[in-house]
Amino acid sequence: MGLQQECDALQAMLSQVLEILAEAQSRANSLPDCQIYELNRQIAEIVDICYDGMGRMQASLAQIERIQAMIGTLDSTSRSPHPPSTTSTYYTEETKSPGNAKQMSNSDWPPQPPEGAKPNLNDPGAAEWRYQRYKYDQYQAGKQQGDILPFEIWKKWYEEAEPVAIRQYEEIIALTDDVSQIAKNLGIVEEQIRKVKEHIFINEHELEIPDNQAKTVISVRSNFTPDAEIADLWFKAKNGSLQPRESLKFKRLIAHEYIEQGLMQQGLPYRSPEAWRDDPIYGFGNWPTPEHYGAHDLAPNTGRPNPFSHWDKIIGKSPQGLTLRDDLSNLDELLEAIRERI
């Protein structure tokens, strides 16, 4: 088994362990307080061990990828009789070979706004329309032509979503009774579900695309990448078919996204631009600090038994006094408590 396969297997086992531990914790309400405290402590230790192991595996993968990238760069440079072209080349759906590649030349600058109405995510030309808008937005923000991502790099980020997830998101956006049904099925405030739906599926956000080889990032305004697991949970919550583990996972998702959107409305970025850096162990990424963090980092963690156990270890803030009720009845109070701390 290769390292990537081992990493995938470990990730799958980690997810299963977290689900089992979360279910065990939810069933322990009948225990005495002292036993609940000890159970939570032991669960937190197990989860930390799992995350540490996963972190080491991902760090090893990142190091291998950097070495492979260096080898590939050296190899291509030594074989090429000409220096790299300063003209960016990118491919469309219809052109798969370099001979038919579309190039971004000086005639494409300054970029114009995209023509026509915004297409759905899986419509023909959807990626090209959004790429044109991305170029235009960057130009309006004062960026130079050399700051613009080539189409093939931008589209790789855009196409991270699976086609099935894209279709699911469009179906969810078109639903008109999902918010009320989910609120009724789970006993959650309808307005909170509505805000979460808008945050995940509808609204565009200021996001950043990393270039791990160049160790740089570029800002884009876009929707979140469609996630099939989130869509599946949303449909099940609407239909009232969530299993106990799934119900817990969905409620954690709602809590995370509701707090995240509330902090972003206050002006906090999704992830801090200043937190992008090269970590000696884990490589280039967004690593929050006590000075630089985003709404995503402060929101309740969806995978840990204690949703705020990451605060002191990752962003250097004390989570003392922050509690998330199982029925999510204190989300607004929790949001205000977090706002007061930042």
Image (spheres, grey):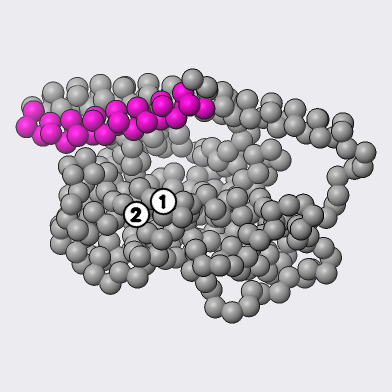
What's the distance in space between the residues labelled 2 and 1, CA to CA? 6 Å
Residue 257 shows in this picture: yes
Q: Residue at x 80, y 30 (%)?
A: 75
Q: Which residue is mark 1?
A: 227
Q: Residue at x 70, y 32 (%)?
A: 69
Q: Is residue 11 magenta?
A: yes
Most extreme residue toward the right is 81
Residue type highlighted by circle 1: Asp
On the image, the x and y values in percent for residue 272 come to 54, 48
On the image, the x and y values in percent for residue 225 come to 48, 54
Most extreme residue toward the bottom is 116
Residue type highlighted by circle 2: Ala
Residue 141 shows in this picture: no
- Identify whether 98 is placed above or below 24: below
* Cβ atoms at labels 2 and 1 below 8 Å apart: yes
**Residue 141 horizontal side relative to residue 45, left or right:** right
Front position in the image: 336 or 281: 281
Q: Which residue is mark 2?
A: 231
- Identify whether 45 is placed above or below 305: above
**Residue 27 horizontal side relative to residue 213, left or right:** left
Highlighted range, magenta = 4-31
On the image, the x and y values in percent for residue 11 come to 41, 30
On the image, the x and y values in percent for residue 175 come to 30, 69
The image quarter in which residue 212 lies: top right
**Residue 269 horizontal side relative to residue 84, left or right:** left
* Disc on res. 176: none
Q: Is residue 12 magenta?
A: yes
Find numbered disc 1 in the image and state the secondary structure of the residue it sits on: loop
Find numbered disc 2 in the image and state the secondary structure of the residue it sits on: helix
